Image: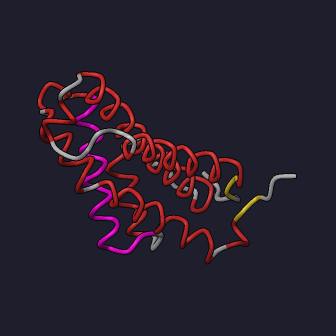
Amino acid sequence: MTPGRLDEKVIAERSEWVRDMLEGIRELPLGSVEEFTAERRNVAAAESSLRRALEAPLDLGRHVLARGFGDAPTEYKEVAKRLGERGVLTAEEAGMFIKMAGYRNRLVHFYETVSDTELYSICVERRGDIERVLGGIHRWIRDHPERIERSP
């Protein structure tokens, strides 16, 4: 695969998607695990929003690798790892992103192993990790404006 330019529209859409999903999580009753689990739809909304908030930066990372470096990993954990290897993310951010990719895989493939309490904990304590990794990707994009294909 030949490197090219990143699509400004893809960057904006995936980034906005993450922000929207995180806002949806923030709007849930996160004062206590009891309040969170009092209504089943809170748990379902959190699970869906969290999964989507994890997938969007992984898709954006795949776009950066494919267009920016001609690199096309097929697995999400590999996307996170290669973003670190390519210097898009710091080692700490890449490590965090690898864990996030693993958690996304659990939500999709091993959903029965994710308890309501664990989901609550992730939504309260780890939500900022998603914002931090997205910020790392944006930092690299800001530092490499020549790699962006501007929308008309």
Residues drawn in magenta: 89-108
Tell me, yes or no, whether the highlighted magenta stretch contains residue 76.
no
Q: Quadrant of residue 69?
A: bottom right
Q: Quadrant of residue 138?
A: bottom right
**Residue found farthest to the right:** 152
User: Observer-nearest residue: 64 or 124?
Assistant: 124
Residue 144's x, y, as percent? 64, 74
Residue 45's x, y, as percent? 35, 29
State left or right for residue 114 relative to residue 78.
left
State left or right for residue 151 relative to residue 128.
right
Q: Residue at x 23, y 22 (%)?
A: 40
**Residue found farthest to the top:** 40
Look at the magenta stretch and give its main secondary structure.
helix
Q: From what the image shows, is residue 71 above or below residue 38?
A: below
Q: Residue at x 88, y 52 (%)?
A: 152
Residue 1's x, y, as percent? 60, 51
Q: How many marks?
A: 0
User: Observer-nearest residue: 52 or 10?
Assistant: 52
User: Observer-nearest residue: 34 or 133?
Assistant: 34
State left or right for residue 151 relative to residue 107.
right
Tell me, yes or no, whether the highlighted magenta stretch contains residue 99.
yes
Instruction: Indicate how the structure is coloured in the image.
Output: secondary structure
Q: Residue at x 14, y 40 (%)?
A: 33
Q: Residue at x 61, y 77 (%)?
A: 143
